[in-house]
Image: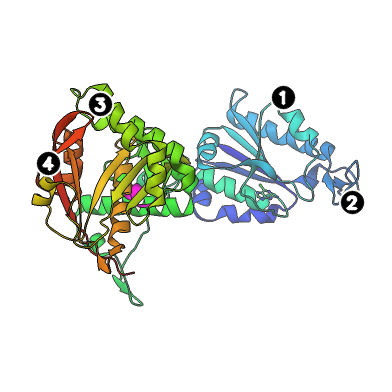
């Protein structure tokens, strides 16, 4: 590859003689030319700029000087790479397209890269327009701030491109794992000896020699960092970039791992504004947990009686009795929980068959936990469950903290059983549950609560 930089401050680019870029030049992987724009001026004062037409502050670089310079410099590429090579004219400017690793990788595939550094208010726009007819032109910016000229941005581009050329970076694995690589995540934090420095210890896992655990730890830290610093990058991940075990961390960080990739997830208390959507969601999700043999009319009757907008309004109006939490995915309701609290500390579960197997007091019931089917498996039920248990653990009845929560789930709902068993619920017995006119067998699960300090 050949790179030519044209600037009025060639000394600025002396830094390129150092380090990896310097080695790439010495090693012959990269041919680098730095040129003084004033060599192409024709007047005694070596004038490169003029006042802006139409008025305004500052000065604009003259197209004629740039035209002569670029003719000569583009010809250097033809001599170096032949007439068929790919040539890119890169113009640093704060009004350019934001440079990213994807673009850098693309530019590393060019044969001849010419970087035209503007100063003052920039280069007469016709220069870019004219050369776009002959070569690829890229006006790029290195970030949302303003520099006095393009030289620093040229250094940035040369270094970013040069390290991708074959043989420049000693260990190609460093390229595979870094931030802005294929993983789509920022890199995890790194440490070296000593293991204790100024009271700060290197995380134990890194000294454990457990490769799988280290990999998981690094992945978790990368997800955390990216979520905190670059939520846009998390939102841009695809489902195929997610690994086993990512879902749990993402849920904790406020993301659902949907089939379309991570989406922002918030769990909050329902309000009156949610009533219509809640009833819709409940009508959509309740039938999912019913066994196939249940007549649709019975299911519909249950939804009308218990999950109508009017019923949800009642639940929300009686906050001492009911707790309703909703999961909002990308601003839309994707799931909810409905819990029933006892009014008195010694109030037993309402049904005798439950009372027989759930003996802790005060005890609440997790009556509903439902998630829209299209986003099952995204970690939303986990987030709802965590938030519901935390909210219940913070509640007291007659001055006593809630000791447990019970729930009943249809004995045939394997999906639910697996979920509860995996999330710390204990199967304590069975009960009968009436949906419409039918009596169904339910499994009863119990979870003890650890009161949260509040
Ligand atoms: Cl590429 N040039 C200048 N002058 N300012 C910038 C920039 C480039 N990128 C961000 N700010």
Residues under numbered marks 4 and 1 in contact, where contact means CB atoms less than 8 Å apart: no
Q: Earlier in the sequence, mark 4 or mark 2?
A: 2
Q: Quadrant of residue 447?
A: bottom left
User: x and y percent of residue 402 in the render?
Assistant: 24, 61
Residue designated by label 4: 431
Q: Which numbered dot is residue 43?
A: none
| SS label for mark 2 | loop
Please say which color scheme the image uses: rainbow
| 74 lies left or right of 359 | right
Q: Main secondary structure of the magenta part?
A: helix
| SS label for mark 3 | helix
The crowd level at tag 1 (other Cα within 10 Å; few <14, some 14-19, many 20+) is few
Region rendered in magenta: 249-254
User: x and y percent of residue 248 in the render?
Assistant: 30, 47
Residue designated by label 2: 45
User: x and y percent of residue 65 in the render?
Assistant: 82, 40
Between disc 1 and disc 2, the foreground one is 1
Q: Residue at x 81, y 42 (%)?
A: 40
Q: Earlier in the sequence, mark 4 or mark 3?
A: 3
Specify whether residue 52 is in view.
Answer: yes
Residue designated by label 3: 298
Q: Residue at x 29, y 66 (%)?
A: 452
The crowd level at tag 4 (other Cα within 10 Å; few <14, some 14-19, many 20+) is many
Between disc 2 and disc 3, the foreground one is 3
| 124 lies left or right of 218 | right
Q: Residue at x 31, y 63 (%)?
A: 394
Specify whether residue 374 is in view.
Answer: no
Between disc 1 and disc 3, the foreground one is 3
Residue designated by label 1: 133
| SS label for mark 1 | loop
Q: Earlier in the sequence, mark 2 or mark 3?
A: 2
């Amino acid at each position: 590859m050949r790179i030519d930089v044209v600037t009025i401050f060639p000394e600025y680019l002396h830094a390129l003689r150092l380090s990896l870029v310097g080695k790439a030049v010495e090693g012959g992987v990269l041919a680098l030319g730095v040129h003084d724009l004033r060599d192409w001026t024709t007047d005694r004062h070596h004038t490169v700029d003029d006042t802006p037409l139409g008025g305004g502050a500052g000065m604009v670089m003259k197209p004629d000087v740039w035209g002569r310079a670029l003719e000569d410099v583009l010809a250097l590429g033809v001599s170096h790479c032949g007439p068929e090579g790919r040539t890119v004219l890169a113009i640093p400017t704060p009004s350019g397209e934001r440079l990213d690793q994807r673009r850098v990788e693309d530019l590393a595939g060019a044969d001849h890269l010419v970087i035209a550094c503007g100063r003052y208010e920039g280069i007469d726009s016709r220069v870019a327009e004219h050369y776009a007819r002959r070569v690829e032109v890229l006006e790029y910016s290195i970030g949302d701030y303003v520099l006095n000229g393009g030289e620093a941005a040229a250094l940035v581009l040369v270094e970013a491109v040069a390290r991708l050329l074959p043989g420049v970076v000693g260990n190609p694995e460093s390229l595979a794992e870094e931030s802005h690589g294929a993983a789509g995540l920022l890199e995890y934090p790194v440490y070296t000896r000593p293991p204790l420095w100024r009271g700060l210890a290197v995380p134990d896992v890194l000294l454990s020699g457990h490769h799988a655990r280290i990999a998981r730890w690094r992945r978790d830290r990368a997800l955390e960092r990216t979520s905190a610093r670059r939520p846009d990058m998390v939102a841009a991940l695809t489902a195929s970039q997610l690994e086993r075990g990512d879902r749990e961390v993402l849920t904790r960080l406020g993301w659902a791992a949907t089939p379309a990739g991570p989406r922002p997830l918030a769990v909050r208390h329902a309000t009156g504004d949610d009533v219509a959507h809640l009833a819709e969601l409940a009508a959509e999700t309740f039938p999912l947990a019913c066994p196939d043999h249940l007549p649709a009319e019975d299911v519909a009757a249950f939804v009308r009686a218990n999950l109508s907008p009017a019923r949800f309004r009642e639940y929300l109006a009686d906050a001492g009795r009911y707790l309703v939490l909703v999961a909002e995915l990308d601003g839309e309701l994707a799931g909810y929980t409905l819990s029933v609290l006892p009014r008195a500390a010694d109030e037993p579960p309402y049904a005798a068959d439950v009372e027989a197997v759930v003996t802790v007091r005060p005890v609440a019931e997790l009556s509903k936990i439902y998630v829209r089917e299209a986003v099952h498996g995204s970690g939303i039920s986990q987030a709802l469950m965590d938030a519901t248990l935390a909210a219940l653990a913070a509640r007291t009845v007659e001055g006593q903290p809630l000791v447990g929560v019970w729930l009943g789930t249809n004995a045939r709902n394997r999906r639910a059983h697996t979920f509860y068993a995996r999330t710390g619920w204990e199967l304590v017995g069975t009960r009968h549950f009436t949906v419409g006119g039918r009596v169904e067998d339910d499994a009863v699960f119990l979870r003890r609560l650890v009161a949260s300090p509040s």
